[in-house]
Amino acid sequence: MAVRRVRDNADLPLPAYQSALAAGMDLRADLTEPVTLAPLERRLIPTGLSLEIPAGFEGQVRPRSGLALKHGVTCLNTPGTIDADYRGEVGVLLVNLSAAPFTVNRGDRIAQLVVARHERAQLAEVKDLSATERGSGGFGSTQIA
């Protein structure tokens, strides 16, 4: 998969899998100065990268579990989708859900990128849908808490 640096950021490593069986590659913050997120503040953090994702695949931007557990910092719009035809800079929408400020520094690992195959659905308008045991039951309809 092709990746392009959108700024002079050769000091930052490209996304990489951190273990042999990891599903996601770490994305890093490409900041010129630290950004502090106040409690409940959200901010789009640049990665300094644009991607050429192959047709039939998408990039999924997902939270890092360590940031969520240790600091209450996660991604909004999760998973964020990077379409195969998008060529702009990848940004990570972080939110601080903790009661304390959190500072993001240059090079911090802020999210994961999972590249996944997807299908495109063909819609066919009908008057009725087939019946199922569940039917139209929505939230909480299975009676499982």
Image: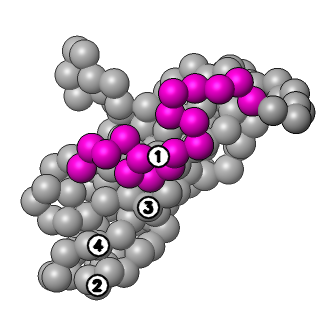
How far separated are the C-alphas under marks 2 and 3?
15 Å
Q: Main secondary structure of the magenta part?
A: loop
Q: Which residue is mark 1?
A: 79
How far separated are the C-alphas under marks 3 and 4?
10 Å
Q: Nearer the viewer, residue 41 or 47?
A: 41
Tell me if residue 98 comes above or below residue 82 in the rendering. Answer: below
Amino acid marked by disc 4 = Asn
Q: Which residue is mark 4?
A: 96
Asked if the residue at tag 1 contacts the one at tag 4, i.e. Cβ–Cβ closer than 8 Å, the answer is: no
Asked if the residue at tag 2 contacts the one at tag 1, i.e. Cβ–Cβ closer than 8 Å, the answer is: no
Provide the residue span drawn in magenta.
129-145
Q: Give the secondary structure at mark 4.
A: strand
Asked if the residue at tag 4 contacts the one at tag 2, i.e. Cβ–Cβ closer than 8 Å, the answer is: yes
Which residue is depicted at the point 67% across and 38% down?
Answer: 83
Can residue 98 be seen in the rendering of this structure? yes
How far separated are the C-alphas under marks 3 and 1?
8 Å
Between circles 1 and 2, the one closer to the viewer is 1
Q: Nearer the viewer, residue 51 or 74?
A: 74
Q: Nearer the viewer, residue 35 or 37?
A: 37
